[in-house]
Amino acid sequence: MEETKTIAHEIGGIQNDALRFGLYGVKSDLIDSHPLQSSLASTKKTQEEMKRKVLANTYGSAFPLKTDLDRQILSRFQRPPGAIPSSMLGLEVLTGSLERFGPEDYLNDPRDSETFRPADMHHGMEVRLGLSKGPVCPMFI
Amino acid sequence: MSKAEIDFPPKGGFSFDLCKRNEMLIKKGVQPPSYRKTGTTIVGLIFQYCGFHSTFLEMLIGCLTKNFKEGGKTEDGVILGADTRATAGTIVCDKNCEKIHYMAPNIYCCGAGTAANTEAVTDMVSSQLQLHRYHTGCESRVITALMLLKSPLFNYQGYVQAALVLGGVDVTGPHLHTIYPHGLTDTLPFATMGSGSLAAMTVFESKYREGLTRDEGIQLVTEAICSGIFNDLGSGSNVDVCVITKGHKDYLRNHLLPNPRSYISPKGFLFPKKTGIDKFFGY
């Protein structure tokens, strides 16, 4: 194993990279870097919840439960981690994002980022089996 | 497998990683790079001409020559106009840019604000409209484009600085809308946006009337844009006009060039020897 002289960007949940996330402190945990960060994250969730409630009121509670089950099944159906990314076609059809087009489709493609790391198959498999912590495709060091 | 978390492949989109660094740099006094704005005059108006004869004499002539069909002709549509100057701070960085963007074959949109934002937003919504057309098989409606533009602009709370004038003709008739950067929209018979909007609005308020013909409408729009060009520092250069009627559109790029380069020396310009080029012939 070659020695890497880098420090992991996340140690125990603390974001360690000072240039990306600022100096660590209690305030930086509570306040996001940009006012839009929390709003963009919660908008999507809120809209999905509203849609789900509408469907439950219209068709009965079994219908959204079945959709949730389908979504769980389809999101687990992925390729093993490696060079080819999973297309998640079934999940996209179910959530309707196949017919949507937004900034995430043409801006900031992760394959073009400066810190792109080719996927480590062994690490990914270990994460899938629960032997290692951390995201399957880590973005930074 | 029950212990493992569901991990989705990484997606693109907005990333807020470097915001803290940028804040820190601004506090230390580093100037952020200035981006290209389109300090602008953009206008739009709806014309609805019912070709009924206005005087009794004309009606008589119409009856005599049996031109009933021509007499009852209505033409209606939307005319959009824009100037062509793009500024970066106090410098004019583009003397002939295109501010009237394509959305759908029957819908066009003028953009003011940050140039990159208007381009990106209109391109994105144009793609969404195309996907929607494939899905439904029908011509796009202007209301659809309006909703698709309004929601992301509101979600981004005005950080995406794009002020738009959206116009088009669909099955329900001609429509004209304005969209403000924070997501507010307006439906109007005539509209102006941009830094030269006040200058252009004076022309519209004094000369607009119901029942304009197509040529009168183009004339009025050109006048409004010229008023913006000559009275506002953020607008200048040429006038672009786009006329949309049912099933047909006319994109008159550089319809009027009121600012020609009239100072080109025929001998060319001589620069001192140390400059990169010896002689520069103006184009």
Image: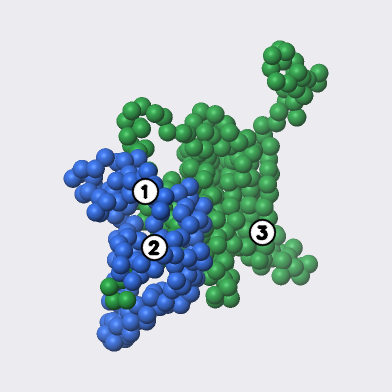
Chain colours: A blue, B green
Chain of the residue under label 1 = B
Determine whether label 1 and label 3 are within 8 Å by CB: no
A6 or B283: nearer the viewer? A6
Task: Give residue B193's position: percent from left, percent from top.
Answer: 48, 45
Which quarter of the rendered picture does the N terminus of chain B lie within?
bottom left
The disc labelled 1 sits on which kind of residue? Answer: Phe
Can residue B46 be spotted in the picture? Answer: no
- Quadrant of image for the C terminus of chain B: top right
For residue B66, what is the image quadrant?
Answer: bottom right
Which residue is at a point 29% across and 46% down the rendered structure image?
A16
Give the Cα separation between the discs numbered 1 and 2: 26 Å
Marks 2 & 3, CB-CB < 8 Å contact: no
Label of residue A123 in the image: 2
The residue depicted at 68 percent of the width and 49 percent of the height is B252
Residue B46 spot, x, y in % from top left = 56, 56
Seen as rendered, the residue at the extreme front is A1
Q: Respond whether the residues carrying marks 1 and 3 are from the same subunit.
A: yes
